[in-house]
Image: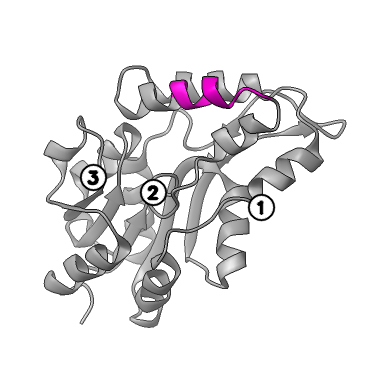
Amino acid sequence: MTVVAFDFDGTLSDSEMTVLLGERCSVADEMAAITERAMNDEIGYAESLRERAALLEGLPESDATAAYEQVELRPGAADLIETLNEAGITTAILTGGFERGVAAALEREGVAVDHIVSNRLPLADGELTGEVNGSLIEGTKDDALESLADDVGAELEDTVAIGDGANDLPMLEVAGLAIGFEPKPAVEPHCDVVVSSMAEAREVLESNAVLE
């Protein structure tokens, strides 16, 4: 296995970026409800993301920055990423979440991944516009994983995908090893193995000879 691709919200991080942003303009409950429906595959992911972004229209950039600064990695996530990097394995984050929040969390822990594929919340006149752009709105994570594998000369059967929600299903279904991180009920049947901590994820990677 030469590529390990992580989802971010709900997997590498137990923070939910849209909820943190929503708290800044008193729409966190609405955000959480939309997110839950999307992760359980009750509504389309693109639709849910646009609905959540629209709720953030007018949020000042300073408040958005403060929300991003609250995004944190799970215990053990930074160590696992660092171990994979040191082993020469290509690491990636494929997330429908937002680039600035991912970057802030990684920077705080002093770690980096080789590739980040994410979305963005555009600004105009110092405020969020209520729109969202990026390759993982309509695009799916299987295409992103396949493109990444091609770029590094790996076969899809030599990749690992780690995720929890319905929008992770495409990459979990095509990866050589699909690891569900406390997956939603609709996702669990599509996982080769289920874990509930980064320590367990490391054990799975070791038992499958991804890590020695």
Give the labeled residue for mark 2: 7
Residue 124 figure quarter: top right
Q: Quadrant of the C terminus?
A: bottom left
Q: Pointers 3 and 1 in contact (CB under 8 A)? A: no
Tell me the amino acid under the disc marked 1.
Glu
The secondary structure type at the circle numbered 2 is: loop
**Residue drawn where x is 60% and y is 57% of the image:** 103
Name the mark nearer the viewer: 3 or 2: 2
Q: Is residue 27 magenta?
A: yes
> Where is residue 35 drawn, in percent x and y?
44, 27
**Residue drawn 64% across the image and 35% down it:** 21
The part of the image, by quadrant, that contains residue 169 is top left
The kind of residue on which mark 3 rests is Leu
Secondary structure of the residue carrying tag 3 is helix
Q: Which of the two labelled residues, at mark 3 and mark 1, occupies the earlier sequence position?
A: 1
- Give the magenta part as a residue range: 26-34
Q: Kindly report the secondary structure that dominates the magenta region of the rendered protein.
A: helix
Q: Which residue is mark 1?
A: 69
94, above or below 188, in the image:
below
User: In this orientation, which residue lies closer to the viewer: 181 or 97?
Assistant: 181
Residue 172's disc is: 3
- Say which quadrant the N terminus sits in: bottom left
| Alpha carbons under labels 3 and 1: distance apart | 29 Å
The image shows residue 48 at horizontal and vertical percentages of: 47, 21
Please, is residue 106 above or below residue 37 in the view?
below
Q: Which mark is residue 26?
A: none
Side (left or right) of 205 relative to 144: left
